């Protein structure tokens, strides 16, 4: 297939592109290289994709630097591309950043998503798979989170834009029969991860011998999901021929880890005794996440297999190599 991946220089996007290329697809990797975090990391990810040895002769990778909010350029890309599938992973990420910079989220996560829906509609694209987020569950307290739970109480603008994406996708699936799949990712981590996420921030400080900031005094739980497991679910969403026109799935590890256990595992992998600044809960944050993945198991054959005891040391090893 010929597949457009937006956010190809992002954390999950790079890994998805690698997997698609390994399976022999033509991949067009789009990114705008914004400066939300270190742009060099994004360029390094893209360079990795450009230089990837391709064992399958049918595979090809074409990088494109475009912003999804630039409708004329996106329309031209679709008209020339003839895409069989679109995997939309480009978005303005970050819960706390959305509190300080709300208009960026309106532009990228709402306007940009609408541009892709319109292009998929007018170009008869076979399926649009897009990144939603576990943050849509907002203030829900009943665990684990299920796709049938109400998600009308977001507690950050980021979460509200992701829920809005699901609603917008439903409209296009209903009115125009555009096949859409929304994926609610749960705390994804792994090699080539994001510098604004706890795994990176903790590792960086531990290696420097600096104290780490632990919010809600450590009383947090997260469904930490290794990136290879997430990629398995993304590819199944792109390729499965048994999905309905409109779908939403949780993609998580189906286990919730105490934050303090994660810190212990990380400190062991780094080889230091952690120093911690215990701090109150941050605005927009939630005390616990935990994914019910029954629907993803049934319809995507989704089977996450990586516990933090395996995934965390793998991340630390990559982190040290990357910064060597």
Image (tube, rainbow, N blue to C red):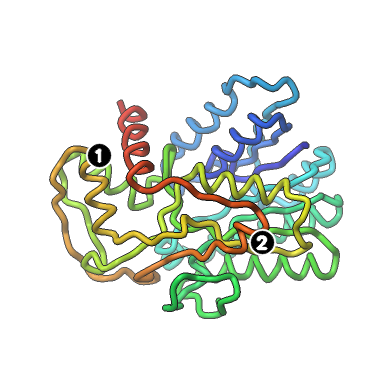
Looking at the image, residue 258 sits to the left or right of residue 177; the answer is left
Q: Which mark is residue 111?
A: 2
Tell us which disc is closer to us: 1 or 2: 1
Give yes or no for contact between labels 1 and 2 (Cβ–Cβ under 8 Å). no
The vertical placement of 95 against 141, above or below, is above
Looking at the image, residue 216 sits to the left or right of residue 147; the answer is left
The vertical placement of 61 against 83, above or below, is above
Residue 228 placement (x, y as % from top left): 51, 42
Helix, strand or loop at disc 2? helix
**Residues at marks 1 and 2, CA–CA distance in whole angstroms:** 42 Å
In depth, the one of 69 and 20 nearer the eye is 20
Tell how many labels.
2
In depth, the one of 141 and 110 nearer the eye is 141
Determine the image quadrant of residue 15.
top right
Quadrant for the N terminus, please.
Answer: top right
Give the residue displayed 79% in from the left and 53% down from the top. Answer: 119
Residue 280 placement (x, y as % from top left): 24, 70
Quadrant for the C terminus, please.
Answer: top left
Determine the image quadrant of residue 247.
bottom right
Q: Which mark is residue 269?
A: 1
Determine the image quadrant of residue 61.
top right
In depth, the one of 199 and 110 nearer the eye is 199
Give the residue displayed 32% in from the left and 45% down from the top. Answer: 309
Label located before the other in sequence (1 or 2)? 2
Residue 10 placement (x, y as % from top left): 52, 43
Q: Which mark is residue 221?
A: none
Question: Is residue 296 in sight in this rendering?
Answer: yes
Give the residue displayed 38% in from the left and 50% down from the top. Answer: 196
Helix, strand or loop at disc 1? helix
- Label 1: few (<14), some or many (≥20) within 10 Å? some
């Amino acid at each position: 297939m010929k597949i457009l991946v937006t956010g190809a220089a992002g954390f999950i996007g790079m890994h998805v592109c690698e997997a698609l290329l390994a399976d022999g697809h033509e991949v067009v990797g789009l990114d705008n290289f914004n400066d939300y975090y270190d742009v060099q990391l994004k360029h390094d990810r893209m360079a990795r994709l450009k230089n990837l040895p391709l064992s399958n002769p049918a595979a090809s990778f074409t990088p494109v630097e475009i912003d999804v909010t630039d409708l004329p350029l996106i329309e031209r890309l679709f008209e020339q591309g003839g895409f069989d599938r679109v995997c939309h992973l480009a978005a303005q990420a970050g819960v706390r950043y959305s509190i300080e910079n709300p208009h960026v989220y309106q532009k990228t996560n709402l306007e940009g998503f609408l541009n892709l829906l319109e292009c998929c509609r007018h170009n008869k694209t076979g399926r649009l798979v897009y990144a939603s987020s576990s943050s849509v569950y907002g203030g829900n307290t009943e665990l684990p989170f299920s796709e049938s739970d109400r998600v009308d109480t977001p507690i950050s603008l980021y979460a509200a834009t992701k829920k809005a994406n699901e609603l917008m996708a439903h409209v296009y699936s209903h009115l125009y029969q555009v096949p859409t799949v929304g994926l609610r990712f749960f705390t994804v981590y792994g090699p080539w991860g994001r510098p604004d996420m706890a795994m990176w921030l903790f590792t960086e400080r531990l290696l420097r011998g600096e104290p780490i900031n632990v919010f809600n005094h450590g009383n947090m739980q997260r469904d930490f999901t290794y990136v290879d497991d997430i990629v398995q679910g993304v590819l199944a969403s792109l390729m499965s021929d048994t999905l309905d026109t409109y779908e939403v799935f949780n993609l998580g590890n189906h286990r919730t880890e105490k934050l303090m256990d994660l810190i212990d595992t990380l400190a062991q992998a780094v080889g230091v005794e952690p120093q911690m600044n215990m701090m109150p809960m941050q605005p927009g944050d939630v005390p616990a996440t935990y994914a019910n993945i029954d629907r993803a198991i049934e319809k995507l054959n989704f089977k996450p297999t990586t516990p933090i005891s395996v995934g965390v040391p793998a991340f630390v090893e990559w982190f040290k190599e990357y910064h060597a």
